[in-house]
């Protein structure tokens, strides 16, 4: 199967600091790929460079077999950053309607997305007045309504409690099963194991491993780690 997205030899520096160094990875068509790494590893920088929000110093991003310049990536992918509150003076219902109109999403999916994200009670509330968890669910609803075939979401579970994380994870799995490719930056190992088909590990701006959980576990054991759990695998490889 051809990769839905291919990142090759991506570099990004801020002066003498290398935020990304020779990062390469593949996102297969219609899969959920997780991006895992410690704080400051370069996860958000990688997402911003891949999405074309931040210019990389070198490297390419391809969809299928075609290299896509930064200014054209919006037609292929939608990027949902972490920690934002767009249109704070507008209601959640307005934001969902605006998203559908702006991107040409399928309005028939609106009711189902509102239900899965459990944001029905929030529709008349202004985005700037939502709690962190409420805002995250509203942002995810916005992202799920966009039509681009690839969705990048930075920390989609941040601010959610355990029950909400499980429900959102199931919704994301179902969304991928409907034909969309997801690339998720995830902080909690439990969320990654539950939601992702494969994982990319990043540390110090470099990729340290890519594969299924079994493949990464085998890699950690080959390096001498006992690897009784995925947290230990990540620690061993990063």
Image (tube, rainbow, N blue to C red):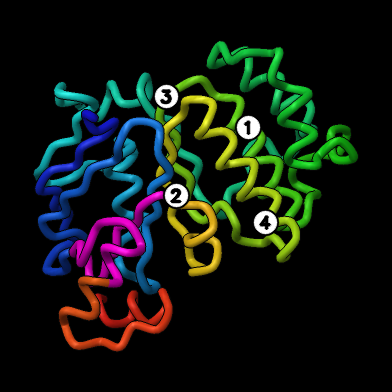
| Distance between the alpha carbons at the discs numbered 4 and 1 | 19 Å
Number of numbered tags placed on the structure image: 4
Q: Are marks 2 and 3 in contact (CB under 8 Å)?
A: no
Can you identify the residue that label 1 sits on? 142
Provide the secondary structure element on which disc 3 rests.
loop
Q: Left or right? Give the position of 3 relative to 165.
A: left
Provide the secondary structure element on which disc 2 rests.
strand
Give the crowd class for mark 2: few <14, some 14-19, many >=20 residues within 10 Å. Answer: many
Give the crowd class for mark 1: few <14, some 14-19, many >=20 residues within 10 Å. Answer: many
Which quadrant, please, contains the C terminus?
A: bottom left
- The picture places residue 218, in percent across and down from the top left corner, at 24, 71
Q: Are marks 4 and 3 in contact (CB under 8 Å)?
A: no
| Distance between the alpha carbons at the discs numbered 4 and 3 | 24 Å
Q: Are marks 4 and 2 in contact (CB under 8 Å)?
A: no
- The picture places residue 76, in percent across and down from the top left corner, at 35, 23
Can you identify the residue that label 4 sits on? 166
Closest to the observer: 25 or 206?
A: 25
- The picture places residue 65, in percent across and down from the top left corner, at 15, 23
Can you identify the residue that label 3 sits on? 149
| Distance between the alpha carbons at the discs numbered 3 and 1 | 14 Å
| Distance between the alpha carbons at the discs numbered 2 and 1 | 15 Å
Looking at the rendered structure, which numbered label has been put on residue 184? 2
Residue at (19% x, 88% y) in the render: 224
Provide the secondary structure element on which disc 4 rests.
helix
Q: Quadrant of residue 63?
A: top left
The magenta region covers: 197-217
In front: label 4 or label 3:
4
């Amino acid at each position: 199967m051809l990769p839905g997205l291919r990142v090759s030899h991506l570099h990004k520096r801020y002066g003498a600091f290398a935020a990304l160094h020779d990062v390469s990875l593949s996102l297969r068509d219609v899969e959920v790929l997780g991006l895992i790494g410690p704080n400051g590893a370069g996860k958000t920088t990688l997402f911003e460079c891949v999405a074309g929000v931040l210019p990389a110093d070198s490297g390419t991003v391809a969809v299928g077999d075609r290299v896509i310049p930064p200014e054209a990536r919006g037609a292929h992918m939608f990027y949902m950053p972490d920690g934002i509150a767009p249109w704070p003076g507008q209601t959640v219902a307005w934001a969902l309607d605006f998203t559908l109109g702006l991107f040409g999403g399928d309005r028939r999916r609106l009711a189902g997305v509102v239900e899965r994200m459990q944001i029905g009670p929030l529709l008349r509330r202004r985005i700037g007045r939502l709690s962190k968890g409420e805002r995250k669910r509203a942002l995810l609803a916005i992202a799920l309504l966009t039509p681009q075939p690839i969705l990048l979401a930075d920390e989609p579970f941040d601010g959610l409690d355990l029950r909400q994380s499980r429900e959102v994870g199931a919704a994301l799995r179902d969304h991928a099963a409907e034909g969309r490719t997801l690339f998720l930056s995830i902080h909690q190992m439990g969320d990654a194991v539950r939601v992702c088909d494969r994982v990319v590990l990043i540390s110090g701006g470099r990729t340290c491993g890519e594969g299924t959980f079994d493949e990464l576990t085998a890699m950690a054991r080959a390096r001498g780690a006992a690897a009784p759990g995925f947290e230990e695998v990540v620690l061993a490889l990063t």
